[in-house]
Image: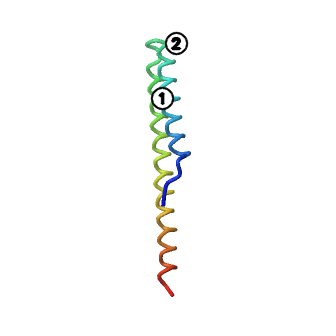
Amino acid sequence: MSRPSYDPLRALAIGTQAAGLIMIIMLETLLGDAARPWQGLCLALMLAAALGIAVVRVYRHKRWQRERARRRQGEETP
């Protein structure tokens, strides 16, 4: 079975990482050395978003595997 060409979770992961990087650079530009705590917070939020997206991906993949196994079980029993 082929995978869809557009994966919304992958797009969300890329978007959150890009937004976080832009925020880190913008904070450094605007606040200078005072940006360090805010950059740390931004990095923590980026990591939390990546972890959340990874958990959702694993959950969806496991659900897909269970559905596929059920279909195979249904085909095997006459």
On residue 72, which mark appears?
none
Which residue type does callout 2 highlight? Leu
Q: Is residue 51 above or below residue 31?
A: below
On residue 30, which mark appears?
2
Q: Residue at x 47, y 16 (%)?
A: 28
Q: In the rendered picture of this protein, how many numbered marks are placed on residues?
A: 2
Q: Nearer the viewer, residue 7 or 39?
A: 7
Which residue type does callout 1 highlight? Leu
Q: Is residue 59 above or below residue 65?
A: above
Task: Please state the horizontal and vertical placement of residue 19, each as a whole percent of the image.
Answer: 53, 29
On residue 41, which mark appears?
1
- Distance of mark 2 from mark 1, alpha carbons? 16 Å
Task: Please state the horizontal and vertical placement of residue 78, each as a whole percent of the image.
Answer: 51, 87
Give the crowd class for mark 1: few <14, some 14-19, many >=20 residues within 10 Å: few
Q: Is residue 26 above or below residue 63?
A: above
Q: How is the image coloured?
A: rainbow
Q: Residue at x 55, y 46 (%)?
A: 6
Secondary structure, mark 1, is helix
Q: Residue at x 46, y 54 (%)?
A: 58
Task: Please state the horizontal and vertical placement of residue 18, each as a whole percent of the image.
Answer: 50, 30
Q: Nearer the viewer, mark 2 or mark 1?
A: 2
Q: Residue at x 50, y 79 (%)?
A: 75
Q: Is residue 24 above or below residue 11?
A: above
Q: Nearer the viewer, residue 30 or 22?
A: 22
Secondary structure, mark 2, is helix
Task: Please state the horizontal and vertical placement of residue 29, each as a whole percent of the image.
Answer: 49, 13
